[in-house]
Image: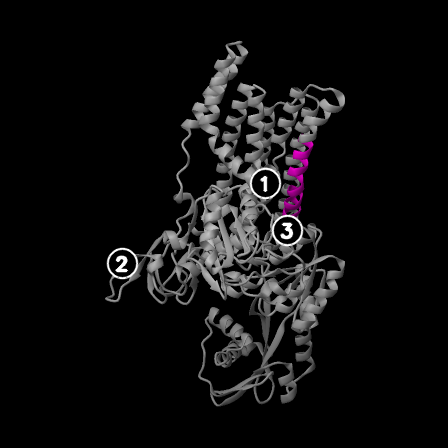
Amino acid sequence: MQASYQRVPAPHDKPVHSHHGHGQDGHKHADHHHDHCCGSTSAPLETLAGARSEGELTVTPIRILQMDCPTEEALIRKQLDAMSEVVALEFRLMQRMLTVTHQKAALPAILSALRELGFNPETAAEAGTLPPADSATAPAPWWPLATSGVLALTAELCDWLSAPAWLAALLALAAIAICGISTYRKGWIALRHLTLNINALMSIAVTGALLLQQWPEAAMVMVLFTLAERIEARSLERARHAIDSLLQLAPPSATMQASDGSWQSMPVDDIPLDAVVRVAPGERIALDGVIISGHSTVNQSAMTGESMPLEKQAGDSVYAGTLNENGAFDYRVTAAASDTMLARIRHAVEQAQDAKAPTQRFVDRFARIYTPTVFALATLLAILPPLLAGGDWLAWIYKALVLLVIACPCALVISTPVTVVSGLAAAARQGILIKGGVWLEQGRKLRTLALDKTGTITHGKPEQTAWQAVEPEHASSCRSLAASLASRSDHPVSRALLRAAEQDGIALQEVSQFGAITGRGIHGVIAERQLWLGNLALAGQLGRNTPEVEGWVAAREQDGNSVVMLMDEERVLALFAVADTIRPASRDAIAQLHKLGIRTVMLSGDNQQTASAIAAAVGIDQAHGGLLPQDKADIIAHLGRDGLVGMVGDGINDAPALARADIGFAMGAMGSDTAIETADVALMDDDPARLPAFVRLSRATHTILVQNIVLALGIKAVFLLLTLLGMGSMWMAVFADVGASLLVVGNGLRLLRK
């Protein structure tokens, strides 16, 4: 998994191939992965600011508003693959975007080739700034389709009432002319380029029906097909919006302090770094920043999935798209609109569509074989029975035409990307950022999950858990002395003692001659009295150990605590136990993982005794302590022998182990840009409950993928059998194709409700 820990590539980067064979498809001459159907290939698209140079090559993003189906992708891929100047293609059907890596001078030829296919390509260089896909095109009017439907129904009625044949033919031809010209045009372009797509198949089928003088049926088939395309396009919009809605959380403008001290509303794109922005109660935060004055509670559920608002005050970070609840504050901007945490999340989800899930790759390969096979079968069905068995030519040609309608694999191909995108969007809404369909689907196979202790199972911030004065009557003064010494140190243990003293209102005293004793503790003088605050090793060095002290220390360490002692020139005065406290959700998360059949292992740099105590407290199956980073990686490699293994850490210190694991999980990505860039799965808050949620979502996604494949192939198989038995008709075949497409899209979108 080494490639997982590179940064997220920018648009000008060369394609990055993932680890363990789950590479992103797309190089024109690499492994011949050219014929995928819904999203594929290489480097992500971070902005639409035009073409970027790579030596002799240029990467150009192109928007094609007519490209929203796998049939268009196959046609474009075949056309551009034939051009030697084109090096790589990246398709994002959900965004209607094509990114082409090509030689510098080839752009006009590429655009011309796309126009030859009947598309209207748009580049940022031509349009200035590319508008959102939804605002760039108006929905097609419904009245032509409605008129065609009325004409087709009237033709059917004339046929039933035995009206003159010429009347039914005239009505049918009018219906086809009004709603079918676009289909015929696309079909002719596909046939001219030797491509069998749904438009070509439908054009052949309707033309054949007209030649057989099946006037009403030909008209009804074309009307139903056009209606189906409209409905399918509307259904796909919902999957697109699942991602687009992430950025719509941030307001378009914010109140910024001008150079003269006044406040004015400014578009977020015009607000520079280090500007001061004011947020009123009830407003959404427009940009990432750090609070400089004021305090409030902020609801970050849109990004982390956690519904409880967080207290925010001066020095705390705030993020674009989150909701300020009941206070007002000013903050200093730390990220431009294009680089906020929200924008990075959206970009990561878009990029994730390029890493195809295993099921999606299987479907793409299957679709390449399916359509030509069924087309060949339809040809044989039209010719062989009449030739070999003396069957009726017209009857068998009609059956072949019905079979052609069934031959389109649209429902099968479109089911996988819609399902995967829905799963990625559903995960993002829960604060789980999954970096590709590969990880979304593979999560269901996890057998072992290794977890770092500090910052994952525990808060990563030590707290005082207990204390004891050797002479109880001097307890209060002992705490004051210990806290005063601790106030001069930045060590986490000292910070814990100081926080506990402040919470209890303990007064601090003046410390002089302060110094640190490396690895053992600190010392200083308070009220002309020499004092030390340190561990058992320091007590032994000073000769202050007693059996009673050692017994108290051993008992606390057995429970996973670290112990420090306050000592003067004669004896130990008090003992303080400090521990990294366990997250409240850790026990439940581990229990849920066990219910899902996943074994848990703790990997910690702390001593074995502490690691074992924490593991036992939360129910982890096995604990390893005293580990260096490479030791963790070696254990991951050993655990991988028993099946897929995941590693949960902070994405930085645990990088070797995260890289060695099949799936790397970064905790608390909201606080770390690096975590988003390095992990396969980034958990946006610090909640370990996201881990079982990820596994459940992965299993649900796989279940729906399998359901969709069975639905798409099952419906086609039923109508194939009905056709061969002479019970199928063309309009029934259209219903089968359309119905299957709508069923799989709707089934895939169910993930958005999880």
Label 1, on which residue?
194
Choose top left, top right, bottom left or bottom right for residue 510.
Answer: bottom left
Earlier along the polypeptide chain: callout 3 or callout 2? 2
Q: Is residue 146 left or right of residue 69?
A: left
Q: Which three-letter amino acid code belongs to the residue tagged 2?
A: Gln
Looking at the image, do the residues carrying marks 2 and 1 touch, with CB atoms under 8 Å apart? no
Q: Which three-letter amino acid code belongs to the residue tagged 1?
A: Leu
Mark 1 residue element: loop
Q: Is residue 751 magenta?
A: no
Label 2, on which residue?
264
Residue 438 in view of the camera: yes
Q: Is residue 345 left or right of residue 292?
A: right
* Residue 26 percent location from the top left of the image: 58, 55
Label drawn at residue 695: 3
**Which one is in front, 703 or 62?**
62
Choose top left, top right, bottom left or bottom right for residue 623.
Answer: bottom right
Q: How far, Cα to Cα, is label 2 from label 1? A: 60 Å
Q: How far, Cα to Cα, is label 3 from label 1? A: 44 Å
Q: Is residue 364 magenta?
A: yes
Q: Residue at x 51, y 55 (%)?
A: 100
The range drawn in magenta is 360-378
* Placement of 507 over or under 751, stated as above or below: below
Earlier along the polypeptide chain: callout 2 or callout 1? 1
